[in-house]
Image (tube, grey):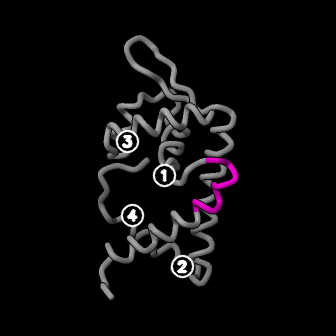
Amino acid sequence: MFQTLSYRLSLLYKDFYAYAGVRLHASGLHKGWIFFMLYVGKHPGCAPAEMTKALHMDWGYSQRCVTKLAEAGFLTKEKTGRIYRLELTEKGRQVFEESQRLFQDWDREKLAGFTASERDTLQALLHRIPLDEEI
């Protein structure tokens, strides 16, 4: 098979989303909504446009997800002046906390065979890869 970083990351991405889907199923949160929840949880009161830009999402998709998240009771969308502000509900805060644990648990599971030094080296190397923005 391909021996590129992008290929390996794609496999890890698929594995993580399968893991997330199982973990989040009981809460009713669709695994595709996890980054929206993380963004709003870390940036309370953010505007949908700000979140869409930061997450590099399509505007229409982002707005549909925000609407579904609000309808499902995970967040509120309050109009302040000319823009909307997003906040997590109590249900949303619980799922936000679970989502953060999910990332930590997946890392712990996948890196269980690594020494502490190897985990630190891997993290340091991955952080050297330039990204447009982090959540």
Highlighted magenta segment, given as a residue range: 20-28
Q: Check disc 1 and report the residue beneath it.
A: 32
Give amino acid for label 1: Gly
Mark carried by residue 61: 3
Q: Residues within 10 Å of mark 3 (few under 14, many from 20)?
A: few
CB under 8 Å between discs 3 and 1: no
Q: Which numbered mark, 2 or 3, is in the foreground of this view?
A: 3
Above or below, 41 relative to 78: below
Q: Is residue 17 above or below residue 57?
A: below
Cα gap from disc 2 to disc 3, whole angstroms = 40 Å
In the image, residue 116 lies at what x, y percent?
58, 77
Q: Which mark is residue 127?
A: 4
Among numbered discs 3 and 4, the one appearing first in the sequence: 3
Instruction: Compare marks 1 and 2 and give the one earlier in the sequence.
Output: 1
Q: Does the residue at mark 1 contact the one at mark 2 (Cβ under 8 Å)? A: no
What amino acid is found at the position of numbered circle 3 in the picture? Tyr
Q: Which residue is mark 2?
A: 117
Element on which disc 1 rests? helix
Secondary structure of residue under mark 3: helix
Left or right: 2 with respect to 91?
A: left
- Label 2 is placed on what type of residue? Ser
The answer to whether the residue labelled 1 contacts the one labelled 4, judged by CB atoms less than 8 Å apart, is: no
